[in-house]
């Protein structure tokens, strides 16, 4: 095996481990979202409003865990100043996709097709998850750039 092949294998295995962490956080986030949706719906809040509020609770939950667990290696050095920028990027990417995707899919699945509320929500969540991982990895928690002798280097 050549050094380049070994390096690529390490990158793929690191990406796979990060994807597993992302899904673990997301699974807990699904619980947060479903719990909020259930509580709000039982309180009489309109199902699309309930969906939006439940998604926001899950987005905030997931961001905090991704910040301190999934992408800790990328966020640890940036401290709180970078955190506010990442939170904004997270809301503009994952949050916007999750909110828009979930509300539109819920409108279709629960509203038009009359799927049960929780089943429709689970389908909506799964549908948005892969795009959310890619946006998080490439845009929100992107590696820091370091300038050295006029060259831009990416941290691993």
Image (tube, grey):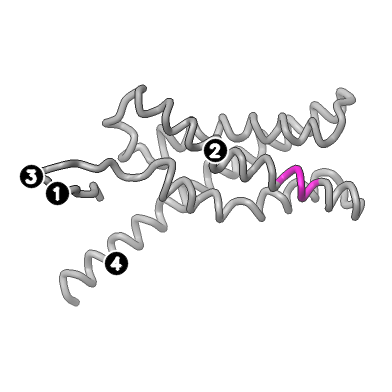
In front here: 96 or 2?
Answer: 96
Query: Residue 59 occupies which quadrant of the picture?
Result: top right
Labels 1 and 3 touching (C-beta < 8 A): yes
Alpha-carbon span between mark 4 and mark 2: 32 Å
Residue at 64% x, 29% y: name it: 57
Q: In the visual, does 147 lie left or right of 103?
A: left
Q: Which residues are magenta?
A: 102-106
Spot occupied by residue 71 in the image (x, y as percentages of width and height): 38, 41
User: Label 4 belongs to which residue?
Assistant: 9
**Comparing labels 4 and 3, the label whose residue is closer to the camera:** 3
Q: In the visual, does 91 lie left or right of 145?
A: right
Alpha-carbon span between mark 2 and mark 1: 29 Å
Alpha-carbon span between mark 1 and mark 3: 6 Å
Q: Which circle marks residue 92 in the picture?
A: 2
Spot occupied by residue 31 in the image (x, y as percentages of width and height): 66, 38
Asked whether 49 falls inside the magenta stretch, the response is: no
């Amino acid at each position: 095996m050549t050094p380049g092949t070994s390096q690529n294998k390490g990158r793929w295995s690191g990406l796979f481990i990060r994807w597993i962490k992302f899904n673990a956080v997301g699974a807990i986030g699904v619980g947060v979202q479903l719990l909020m949706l259930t509580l709000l719906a039982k309180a009489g809040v309109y199902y699309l409003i309930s969906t939006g509020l439940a998604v926001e609770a899950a987005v905030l939950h997931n961001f905090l865990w991704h910040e301190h667990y999934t992408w800790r290696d990328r966020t640890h050095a940036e401290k709180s100043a970078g955190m506010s920028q990442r939170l904004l990027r997270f809301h503009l990417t994952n949050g916007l996709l999750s909110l828009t995707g979930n509300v539109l899919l819920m409108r279709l699945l629960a509203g038009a097709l009359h799927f049960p509320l929780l089943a429709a929500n689970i389908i909506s969540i799964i549908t948005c998850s892969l795009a959310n991982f890619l946006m998080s990895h490439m845009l929100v928690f992107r590696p820091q750039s370091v300038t050295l002798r006029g060259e831009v280097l990416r941290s691993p």
